[in-house]
Image: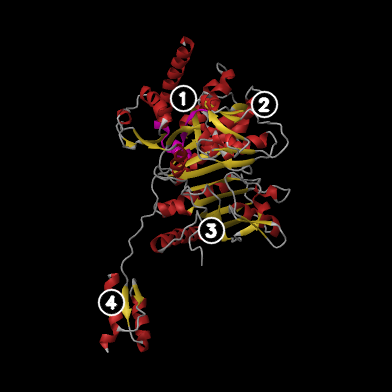
Amino acid sequence: MVPIKIALTKGRTEEQVLPILEASGIDCQGLRNKRRRLIFKEDPRYEIILVKGPDVLTYLNSGAVQVGIVGSDILAEQRNSQYAMLDLSVGKCRFVLASTEAFDPHQQRRKIIATKYPNITKDYFQRIGEDVEIVKIEGSVELAPLVGLADAIVDIVETGNTLRENNLRIYAKLMQVNTKLVVNRLALKQFRPQLRVLMTNLQRADAKFAAMNLIDSYAK
Amino acid sequence: MKNKNLPNGTRDELGVQAEAKEVVENQLFQSFRRRGFRKLTTPVLEYQDVFKPLNQNHYRPYQLLDDQGETLVLRPDLTLPVARVMSTTGIELPVKWYYGGDVFRLKKQLSGSYNQLTQAGVEIVGYGGMKADWECLTVALSGCHELNIQSVVVELSQATFVDTVMAQLPLPSPTKVTLKTALYAKDLSRYNHLWAPLKGSEYAPFLSEWPWLFGNFDDILALVNTLPKAPRITKLVDQLTATRSFIAQQFPRVDTTLDLSVPSPQAYYTGMTFRGFTASSADYLFSGGRYDDLLTNFQKVPVAAVGVAFDIDALVQRQPLRKPDAPVLIYFENDQWPQAEQLLAGLPNATLCLVDNQAAAEALAASSGSQLIDLTKSR
């Protein structure tokens, strides 16, 4: 049987998703001791490749892989057209509009907004009927309002610690973000039985993890 | 010249690759003509309005302005120009057209996708019965067969099935809208949450499986049969079942599957739709269906229409690319041209060697690994 190819976002997503993949019955020993390898075939049913988040859809759209595991932030920013079939209970965070204390969100002028996510930012301001100048920044977006590059930023926050440490506060909460399992539209037809098994097992494993996390959070 | 590079998303096709595409196109065109279809050629440039019915997210066109300031586009589709022709020329119905050419769609930059795609297909206009749908399927499947593409799977669908079932569900209208969106996106997490109020109802066996309602024909029909009986659903299912029998009779080696969980390919589709693929193809090989509302963008009266389009680039990828043989070079003096022509006509892989002296001809033959026929030696 031809193995299902899965593009997994490396880094934090990989670390968070790994226990769920293992609990779903996928052999992830290779990923546990990966060194510099990028392709893992320990489980004959699956071939897992590690890629950067923004590249997951490139592999998926070309049909080079059948499944992707990636944050919904990237899917929204890249205008995903494949099937985002499962929400996984990890990688939960939120987009926010943030700036310094001095920022006035109601000030009547065309604001400058810095972000790594121009499409999501454009969608948000279009929805609230405001025209803004968007500046694309590749990293450390928090700097932009502090050094006068932008009036505010649109960025992802998990705990809000980075914002607080840089004396920034949240002015609006935008969309929520979590990790998603995405499937190539044609591959779903070509590998229906295998993909259904994968998804059923992942759903079960993820529900178990979500329940355990809930118990942990109550215990704290 | 400052910029000699190709724009992103375009490509040159050379030699064997270009010839393979020509062979595929010619074979299909020949097959269309043999079935009595007539050629219809439309321009690459059209007014933007012609393509208004298309989903602009999937068919972003290249745009430019004409001298009057009207927006023109490089055609992103070949079916709507046929509808434009039909509504503006008073052609008598019924009619069968075939077409071929390139369509242009702006895709994500630097994603490895091509913005210029080649298609060929047929449109049958003015026939309202299933025979027209079946001729399109026959065109599609015999085209694949003639191109020696094995293990083709035909996936049948129905443009109105989802709305027909949704109309029956005892859910508030806003919930139906979001349920449909989740179903089409196959967003299982959201879909399962939305249909939860109907758990335990007579719709539950169907709703619990709806996002997975594609694949084996009989399994899908068994699930559809769990729905409360409704004449409109029965009629749609009967059409699909009759089509499956038709394919089984005419093309016994073709596997027919069903998908009753997808949206209509475009808003103007009104009946059965179909697509073809193989287990190893990254794209659909052909797609088509009935679109009796195709002409309503151009005129008030709807006209029965059904068509199918091949993705020529996907078909070419399924063809074995032959390694070109080194040509036989025919070297000759100017006054030996008639002899050279005669030889050329008799040798399948020969070409005239146009250098001016024997030494250059020998050097060219050696560098290209070709056999050299030197007519000057026979003098």
Residue B20 lies in quadrant: bottom left
Q: Which mark is residue A90?
A: 1
- Please name whichever residue, B194 or B218, is drawn nearer the observer in this view of the structure: B194
Direction from residue B211 to residue B150 in the image, left or right:
left
Question: Which residue in the rendered view is the most extreme toward the front?
Answer: A147
- Residue wearing tag 3: B100
Is residue A182 on the magenta stretch? yes
Is residue B280 on the magenta stretch? no
Q: Which mark is residue B52?
A: none
- Please name whichever residue, B291 or A54, is drawn nearer the observer in this view of the structure: A54
3D distance between C-alphas at marks 3 and 2: 43 Å
- State if disc 3 and disc 1 touch (CB < 8 Å): no
- State if disc 1 and disc 4 touch (CB < 8 Å): no
Indicate the amino acid at tag 3: Gly
Q: Chain of mark 3?
A: B
Q: Label 1: few (<14), some or many (≥20) within 10 Å?
A: many
